[in-house]
Amino acid sequence: MLAANPPKRPFFLTHSLHLSSSPSPSFKITCSAAAEERSEFRLGLPNEGHITADTLDLLKDCQLSIKHINPCQYVAKIPELSNLEGWFQRPKDIVRKLLSRDLDLGITGLDTVSEYGQGSEDLIIVHDALGYGECHLSLAIPKYGIFENINSLNKLAQMPQWTREKPLRVATGFTYLGPKFAKENGLDHVSFSTADEALEAAPAMGIADAILGLVSSGITLKENNLKEIEGGVVLRSQAVLVASKRSLLKMKSALETTHEILERLEAHLKAEGQYTVVANMRGNSAQEVAERVLSQPSLAGFSLKGKGPTISTVYCKRDGQIKADYYTIVICVPKKALYKSVQQLRAFGGSRVRCSPVTCICDEETPRWRELLSKLGL
Ligand SMILES: Nc1ncnc2c1ncn2[C@@H]1O[C@H](COP(=O)(O)OP(=O)(O)OP(=O)(O)O)[C@@H](O)[C@H]1O
Ligand SMILES: O=P(O)(O)OC[C@H]1O[C@H](OP(=O)(O)OP(=O)(O)O)[C@H](O)[C@@H]1O
Ligand SMILES: [Mg+2]
């Protein structure tokens, strides 16, 4: 958040976590008694934040409509999957509620899953790359003062200022991942303090020496005179679909519902940015047209799994006889290569090139489904 924006909540510095103790105290998860009895399958959706709009857009693009029964309620129906309910929750609460089995599936950032999941074996990533909410968790220090010439984690760790009595003070909302990273990277004299929001203000306020927070465009760091350092990235994150392993294994039709959600996601995401290009080609035979097109390596590369292109004959009736008139070629091209492909098809005798976005690519079986079954031991 930019310093200019009023913080949503005050900045709290509640306690220090020293590296001599194990990473973040483990918290006890109580399993909801009703979980085993529920028949509906619950999908946690991030409410009012960075990934809310993109999550709703993604589900819409997958033909999964989120129907609020009442705009003030946190629950929504998803009519395409009758036993599925959407529940709007804070991203971190999605993870907590998956662990307590008050939710069965959820969409949230990988950073949140890693921080609040704390490596729990009960959480399974069903889809690891939903394609939005990209950011990274990174250590940042001031650009000025004693840090002016410090540009790497090694240099930071070697600064004589940090001792057992006076460790490097890092403000963060990631009090599990922070100490774990420090331990794994030989940062010996460091203490972490919890800060929920407006983290980037902490060094200027004198509350901390450094921060460990999320970076997306980097603008917030820049505006607050902070910089990232080499070796300081803890985690790269984007939105993921995560599930409770126990829900998948124990709830009736959980696997069926998850399979359908995964298929819809995969089909849509695979198609994103792909265009179908159809061109009329002059030529003497389908074989000759194929040879011409395949002689151009960049066009040949767009065939499916090394096969293709698809060429069909367009017939016409001339002098009472049915004859091959011209050929139609179909290729699939990523958006960035669209115009170049059109030019090349034209150069190879193509006329009337039609381009349309692909909305889904449905493979026989999605690779992530196989992976999920194997993670579940099925
Ligand atoms: N600047 C950003 N750009 C893109 N994605 C971000 C950005 N900041 C956070 N995210 C991603 O969005 C997720 C949700 O962040 P968001 O800021 O909406 O909620 P929050 O701060 O975690 O929760 P709270 O509701 O408690 O404020 C993060 O876990 C991260 O994966
Ligand atoms: O690199 P940038 O594009 O500038 O984005 C990074 C900022 O976005 C997030 O804050 P958010 O807006 O979620 O505010 P918060 O501190 O209230 O969570 C994050 O905590 C950073 O402050
Ligand atoms: Mg935030």
Image: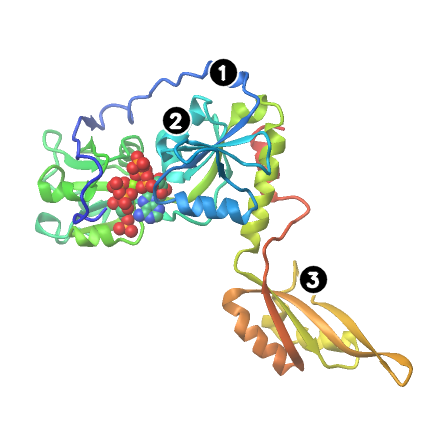
Tag in front: 2 or 1: 1
Label 1 element class: helix
Residue 101, placed above or below residue 374: above
The mark that comes first in sequence, 2 or 3, is: 2
| Identity of the residue drawn at 22% across and 46% down | 140
The mark that comes first in sequence, 2 or 1, is: 1
The quadrant where residue 209 appears: top left
The mark that comes first in sequence, 3 or 1, is: 1
Three-letter residue code for mark 1:
Ala
Residue 368, placed above or below residue 15: below
The CA distance from mark 2 to mark 3 is 46 Å
Mark number for residue 251? none
The crowd level at tag 1 (other Cα within 10 Å; few <14, some 14-19, many 20+) is few
| Identity of the residue drawn at 35% across and 40% down | 48
Mark number for residue 96? 2
Q: Which residue is mark 1?
A: 34
Three-letter residue code for mark 3:
Lys
Residue 294, placed above or below residue 249: below
Q: Quadrant of the C terminus?
A: top right
Q: How is the image coloured?
A: rainbow
Residue 110's spot in the image, x, y percent? 40, 39
Label 2 element class: helix
Q: Which residue is mark 3?
A: 307
Three-letter residue code for mark 2:
Arg
The CA distance from mark 3 to mark 1 is 52 Å
